[in-house]
């Protein structure tokens, strides 16, 4: 049974309703956000990390604030470009908030694209996963995995080298364009680390070489993989975050049956971060959204979508995580080898991958 049918957003709120969610003057913030009247999000597909239920929970809690969802399938680079392109624009096409890959947070700050804001639960977010000034802060993480259509793939691959085997001809895809998508960029990093490259430029170079071989072998499919392309058979194997694969598995309800495999090596964990646009047309609604996401209710919403929320340890320590949520996650052993690359390592890897993909791999992913 899908976890979302076990524990809805309403049920999550009921669990928490006996304790205050926020430490600051929420009445004033709610009033100001209600005056804004709208929140513009971007790049939040409903199947990603349980965002559909998270957004529904925010709407139920604050019904006077409309949620304007821009380009759900955008990548991290697209989000930053949307902020750049809409500086001074107060219309509905200007995003108020961002959800981007770890390496994109500092980039956005350096470009002046974000504003400072610290949520009430700030002290429970690990220092390593947030900007000291409050320009960006980690929200959730997962590990890269193989999402496999078992109707079409007889032998489910268990590690990166397996993907090079002839039996996987025209079968392997990424879940984004490696020139713009954080998920795909880190997938190249993971492949490179499995091949022996150290996290950073070396992993980027080694990962590009792996995908060059995969492409030349005829195994790589230059199509952005998602639940629909897996079900249709266009991309029988997709390299994606574990939480995406688990959500796709639930959505498809066994038609076709999917298996989500954390590879034996090159297990890379990716933290995504939230930020408020420096040019947000609805800044108070943006702040209220952040308060919701980093409350216990919001964090459990992500956990219901199979993501590890950034405040996971804090929630676990105070017994705020329902046992059925813990039982629905993959075995803890699957995460034991996970590597959390530093910002510098991710930045060096990103530069190598985005600069070298066209010349080394030469596959136009779209």
Image (tube, helix red, strand yellow):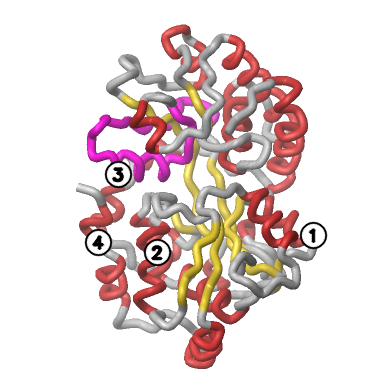
Closer to the N terminus: mark 1 or mark 4? 4
The residue sitting at 57% across, 49% down in the picture is: 74
* Mark 4, residue position: 7
Q: Is residue 244 magenta?
A: yes
Which part of the image, by quadrant, shows the C terminus? top right
Q: Does 308 appear above or below 152?
A: below
* Segment colored magenta: 237-266
The Cα atoms of the two marked residues, 1 and 2, are separated by 29 Å
* Mark 2, residue position: 54
* Mark 3, residue position: 251
Image check: 152 left or right of 273? left
The Cα atoms of the two marked residues, 4 and 3, are separated by 16 Å
Which secondary structure, mark 2?
helix
Which secondary structure, mark 4?
loop
Question: How far from the left and from the top, in percent, is residue 53?
Answer: 35, 62
**Can you tell which mark lies on residue 136?**
none
Closer to the N terminus: mark 1 or mark 3? 1
* Mark 1, residue position: 110
Of circles 2 and 4, which is in front?
2
The residue sitting at 25% across, 69% down in the picture is: 11
Question: How far from the left and from the top, in percent, is residue 19?
Answer: 35, 82
Closer to the N terminus: mark 1 or mark 2? 2
Which secondary structure, mark 3?
helix
Question: How far from the left and from the top, in percent, is residue 216?
Answer: 61, 11
Of circles 2 and 3, which is in front?
3
């Amino acid at each position: 049974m899908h976890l979302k049918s076990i524990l809805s957003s309403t049920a999550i709120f009921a669990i928490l309703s006996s304790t205050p969610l926020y430490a600051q003057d929420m009445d004033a913030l709610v009033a100001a956000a209600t005056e804004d009247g709208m929140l513009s999000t971007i790049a939040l597909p409903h199947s990603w990390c349980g965002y559909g239920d998270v957004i529904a929970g925010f709407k139920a809690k604050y019904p006077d604030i409309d949620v304007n969802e821009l380009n759900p399938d955008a990548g991290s680079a697209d989000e930053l470009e949307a902020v750049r392109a809409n500086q001074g624009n107060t219309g509905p096409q200007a995003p108020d908030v961002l959800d981007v890959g770890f390496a994109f947070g500092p980039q956005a700050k350096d470009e002046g694209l974000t504003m400072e804001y610290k949520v009430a639960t700030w002290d429970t977010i690990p220092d390593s996963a947030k900007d000291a000034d409050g320009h960006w802060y980690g929200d959730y993480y997962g590990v890269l995995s193989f999402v496999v259509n078992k109707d079409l793939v007889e032998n489910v691959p268990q590690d990166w080298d397996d993907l090079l085997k002839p039996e996987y001809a025209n079968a392997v895809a990424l879940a984004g364009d490696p020139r713009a998508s954080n998920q795909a960029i880190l997938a190249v990093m993971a492949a490179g680390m499995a091949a022996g490259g150290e996290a950073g430029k070396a992993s980027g170079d080694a990962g590009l070489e792996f995908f060059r071989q995969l492409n030349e072998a005829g195994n790589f499919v230059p199509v952005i993989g998602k639940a629909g392309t897996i079900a249709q058979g266009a991309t029988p194997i997709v390299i994606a975050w574990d939480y995406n694969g688990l959500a796709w598995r639930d959505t498809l309800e066994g038609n076709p049956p999917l298996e989500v495999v954390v590879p034996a090596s090159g297990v890379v964990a990716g933290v995504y971060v939230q930020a408020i646009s420096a040019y947000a047309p609805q800044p108070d609604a943006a702040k209220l959204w952040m308060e919701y996401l980093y409350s216990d209710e919001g964090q459990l919403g992500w956990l219901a979508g199979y993501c590890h929320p950034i405040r996971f340890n804090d929630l676990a320590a105070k017994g705020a995580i329902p046992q059925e949520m813990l039982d629905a996650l993959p075995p803890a052993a699957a995460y034991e080898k996970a590597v959390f690359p530093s910002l510098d390592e991710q930045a060096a890897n990103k530069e190598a991958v985005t600069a070298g993909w066209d010349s080394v791999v030469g596959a136009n992913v779209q």
